[in-house]
Structures are given as C-alpha cells and as structure tokens.
Image (tube, grey):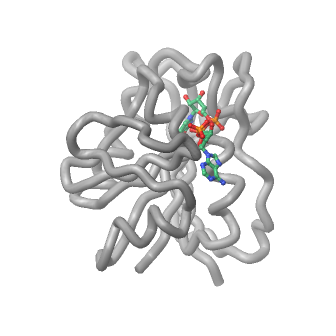
Amino acid sequence: MIISLIVAMDLNRAIGYKNQLPWKHLPADWDNLKTVTAGKKMIMGRKSYESPDRLWSEVGNVVITRQPNYQTDAGFLVADTLEKALQLVGDVNEVFILGGEEIFRISLSIADRIYLTIVKGTFQADAFFPEFPEGDFREIRHDDYQSDSENPYDYAFIVYERK
Ligand SMILES: NC(=O)c1ccc[n+]([C@@H]2O[C@H](COP(=O)([O-])OP(=O)(O)OC[C@H]3O[C@@H](n4cnc5c(N)ncnc54)[C@H](OP(=O)(O)O)[C@@H]3O)[C@@H](O)[C@H]2O)c1
C-alpha cells in the first residue's frame, strides 16, 4: 500500500487556525485535492474530522481518536492508533492521510508520498506541517501558479516520493 500524505501549508508551514484552514478561499487547491484523491480512502485526526473544512472520501474514511465509543457519521470508521487505521483501510493501492498536525507528526516517518500545496502567503495559525527530512524524498512534480480571479494567492503543487 502506498501511504500518501496530502497537505496545504503557507510559507511558514501553517495549515490550520481554530480548526479551520488559515486561508478562506483557494479553489484550485480543493480541485487538485479532489483529483488526486479520487476513489481513494482517507485517514484523518479527530479534530480535522470535526473541522467545518472536513474532507471525506466516498469509498471510506477512518478517524483517529483515543476516545472510546467516539461516534461518527456514516462512512467513517474509528481507530485508536494509526496502525489500526491502516488495518481498517484494508487492501488498497494507495491511502491518503489528511492530517492535521498531530496526525502528520505520527505518519511522516511512514509516508511514501507527500502531496504538498504551498500557499504563497502568511496567515495566522495554530497548526503547522512538521519539518521533515526532505533529503529522503525526491520531487516528482513541481508546478507553480500565479494568483488569478478565483485564487487570491500564488501557489505551487509539489509531489515528493520517498527515495
Ligand atoms: N491545510 C491542510 O492541509 C490541513 C489538513 C488537515 C487539517 N488541517 C487543519 O489542522 C488543524 C487540526 O490539526 P490538529 O493537530 O489540531 O488535530 P488532528 O491531527 O486533526 O486531530 C488530533 C486528534 O487526533 C487524535 N490523535 C492524535 N494523535 C493520536 C494518537 N497517537 N493516537 C490516537 N489518537 C490520536 C486525538 O483525538 P482525541 O482528542 O479525540 O483523542 C487528537 O486530539 C485544523 O486547523 C485543520 O483545519 C489542515
């Protein structure tokens, strides 16, 4: 199974503020995310699950929480460790780990790929994408885009694959 992290961060590695995205609007990133993750299962932390910006997959999702008997909406399973979440995902070719910060911290060491959007601005934030050993990865995609009428910030889509 390919374990992929997918994340959008700003120039200071910010990914969240008050359990939402730090920026209000970047539709190109949502479009990219939907294209990249289409048909793939997702794993997310409990706080990201509770975020108004929550994402989910139509084919299956797992929420990681230490709370026993945590109740979720239909389409979401619950696991109390990352390892159990991966077991619940089952036999798939690729799974996406959606974050947030805490879940990225425990999954970076097992990531095969990182789909990274850089939002070229700085925003108020209380959640960040951890530093990771970039030398362990090679860039297999790097596309830079300018802001436009729909997307108020310059941004880049980068894909890293573990060497
Ligand atoms: N920009 C992006 O790409 C992106 C993506 C996702 C999220 N976000 C943002 O990131 C922020 C949320 O990140 P976060 O770090 O606060 O929360 P999070 O990682 O989404 O969830 C944290 C929760 O996961 C559970 N958890 C964490 N480590 C665990 C472990 N080792 N074993 C079992 N359960 C564990 C705990 O749930 P319990 O407390 O229930 O036990 C913990 O409170 C939000 O602002 C969100 O909008 C941004």
In percent of width and height, residue 125 lies at 72, 22
Viewer-closest of 142 and 162 = 162
Q: Is residue 43 above or below residue 72?
A: below
Residue 132 appearing in the image: yes
- The quadrant the N terminus occupies is bottom left
In percent of width and height, residue 124 lies at 73, 16
- The quadrant the C terminus occupies is bottom right
Q: Is residue 97 left or right of residue 36?
A: right
Q: Which residue is located at x 37 percent, y 54 percent?
A: 42
Q: Quadrant of residue 67?
A: top right
Q: Is residue 24 above or below residue 86?
A: above
In percent of width and height, residue 155 lies at 56, 37
Q: Is residue 17 above or below residue 120?
A: above
Q: Which residue is located at x 68 percent, y 45 percent?
A: 102
Q: Is residue 2 left or right of residue 160?
A: left
Q: Quadrant of ligand 1?
A: top right
Viewer-closest of 76 and 11 = 76
In percent of width and height, residue 150 lies at 38, 19
Q: Which residue is located at x 38 percent, y 52 percent?
A: 62
Q: Which residue is located at x 49 percent, y 70 percent?
A: 3
